[in-house]
Image (cartoon, coloured by chain):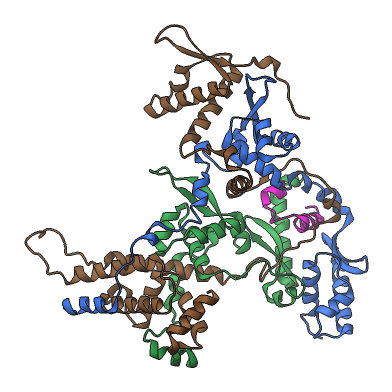
Chain colours: A brown, B green, C blue
Amino acid sequence: MTAEAHHHREEHLPLLDGFHEQYSVHLDKFDGPMDLLLHLIKKNELDICDISIAVITRQYLEFIKLMKELNLEVAGDFLVMAATLLQIKSRQLLPRDDQEEPEEEEADPRAELVRRLLEYQQYKEAGMVIGARALLGREVFARTESEPILKAAQNVEGPLEVSLFELVDAFRVLLQRIPVESFHDVAPGDSLSIADCINEILSLLQEQDTVQFDELVRDELTRERVIVTFLAILELCRLKLIRIFQGSEFGQIWFVPAVAKDSAEVDLP
Amino acid sequence: MNSELPSIIESLIFTAESALPVDRLCELLGEFERDQIKLALAELVAHYQERAGGFDLVEVAGGWQFRTRPVFHGYITRHIKTRMSKFSQSALETLAIIAYRQPITRAEVEHLRGVDCGGVLKTLLEKHLVRILGKKDIPGRPLIYGTSKEFLEVFGLKDLKSLPTLKEIQALDAVPQYERQEELQLEPDKVIQVENQLPLE
Amino acid sequence: MNSELPSIIESLIFTAESALPVDRLCELLGEFERDQIKLALAELVAHYQERAGGFDLVEVAGGWQFRTRPVFHGYITRHIKTRMSKFSQSALETLAIIAYRQPITRAEVEHLRGVDCGGVLKTLLEKHLVRILGKKDIPGRPLIYGTSKEFLEVFGLKDLKSLPTLKEIQALDAVPQYERQEELQLEPDKVIQVENQLPLE
């Protein structure tokens, strides 16, 4: 909470003067609408499977009202649940129409919410059980010092230890660092499948001198595959990596590496 | 059996960077039979259990590692900074959902929790407790998440199967326990009273 | 003497980043007498000497430390080959560029990173994460790079299409859509109206 927000609140709610800190701590305890609902159910000593929607809805709305009075930001998630509760309540109160859907069992409008609450409660408790374990780096420690004889040793092989998130994050950080104009065309969505296709074509061209368009789409003759392959070829051509040939009009499309592979020497130091 | 084998294994586990799986032990000690290695390991485990000293030999994240016994953490933190801060309830909830329901999408987590989980998810990814498993083969190809090896390491779990089952957790709940959340009064005028008393039932 | 003291000392030495001097031990364990600490330490040393396991408690550089016994060094150095190799930030960055922008030349990678990438590229090629896809038909005929099958395996990806896009990672931080929606009407009088209109059960 910012200092201004605090100030603001004091002006408007002299009643709660001096208790804001504790109070906001309480409000923060609710990890979303499901958590608040569970609290209300417990507080009213209700059975989750047979909650009084009227009581819960009233208290839930009062709570949100209070949050607003305290100038706390009410997250959209809380409002979504408020709407759900009001909807269930109104459905419960609607006169039951026997004529229209006689074959369908009268479903309890609360059923879906009850199911979600039960499931949520399960995971909330599972979280507490997990959190109560002795954690490495908090209650339990492993040896941190490495053995002197191993310290000196360099390792080149061995399994790699890196996560996908780290890879994407490295790319994200890099993009923040470099000017936008040099990176205007960041692969949107599915264009990465074109990358798969490019990779595939170039691999094939390392094994054989020429490749036919048909060869690439033979195994998977779908509209998507043909389009992606075609786009991959255009891209390869644009990048001057391949040359395209066509024997005759509507004839077979061939492509070859733009540069013969025998002249391949590594350009690394 | 080579009488030195338990000591050799002990020295390897002791110097390993992280929990050492039996498979890797066997790989490192190619001159010994797998059965011999497993027997020697069992001997070591029994020794440390019986001795109950400053540290134990425990199985975590599919491997073996020496770890201090939790009772001594009060002394250890006098010279070692705790790496892990306490997890927030929302982090634990999200972690539990991912652990029990993996592979799972962000939308599925959010549906279960009823709140936006982007921030929590990002923190869990940054802490390496959760990882991206790939993309789901449904329209939109959303990312799918699962728990990582670090999750098992941090929470001291042998594998995902050693997580308490949800049934077991429910059974725990059947036993009456004190309300973890203090009462929250909704009538503003009563709030002050409650705050002052704070009696836990 | 506190019967747990040797275990406490053991856990402290075990977790210390370097050899732990007796003075430091006494400082950390202010509630115990120096003589008690020295006695407990002597007890521990005797235990490890007698046991002659994989490691010993030895005094080095004025402090106490657990050290593996030299006879086992032949086994311990076998670790090096299976040790997890960690990625440097520059390797990760280079790999990310290649993964997301392939096919790409070294010059293009270097333009983006602003530094020479020859060394990193060589390492990535050696680790088989990156491979040469071919040569580009422009002056100088530079080699072009792409990711390998091993790359997909290391990251557990089915194909390149399964790589998360930047958008997806950035979306974790984003404010959910519905928060920008109009506020739900929650004015007290309106709520009461609802309550009054609808007969409550």
- Identified at 49% across, 26% down, the residue is A232
Quarter where residue C200 is shown: bottom left
Taking depth in this image into account, of C72 and A148 the one nearest to the observer is: A148
* A52 relative to C112 in the view: left or right: left
* C179 relative to B118 in the view: left or right: left
Q: Is residue B19 visible?
A: yes
Q: Is residue B181 visible?
A: no
Compared with residue B61, is residue A40 higher up or lower down, i.e. above or below?
below
Q: How many marks?
A: 0
Q: Main secondary structure of the magenta part?
A: helix
- Identified at 36% across, 74% down, the residue is A37
The x, y position of residue A144, in whole percent, is 76, 61
* B182 relative to C184 in the view: left or right: right
Q: Indicate yes or no whether the magenta region holds residue B16.
A: yes
Compared with residue C2, is residue C171 higher up or lower down, i.e. above or below?
above
Q: Quadrant of the C terminus of chain A?
A: top right
Residues drawn in magenta: B1-26
The x, y position of residue C42, in whole percent, is 89, 75
- Identified at 52% across, 82% down, the residue is A21
As drawn, which residue projects farthest toward the top? A248
The x, y position of residue C191, in whole percent, is 25, 76
Q: Indicate yes or no whether the magenta region holds residue A250.
A: no
Quarter where residue A121 is shown: bottom left
The x, y position of residue A112, in whole percent, is 29, 64
Compared with residue A236, is residue C91 higher up or lower down, i.e. above or below?
below
- Identified at 64% across, 14% down, the residue is A260
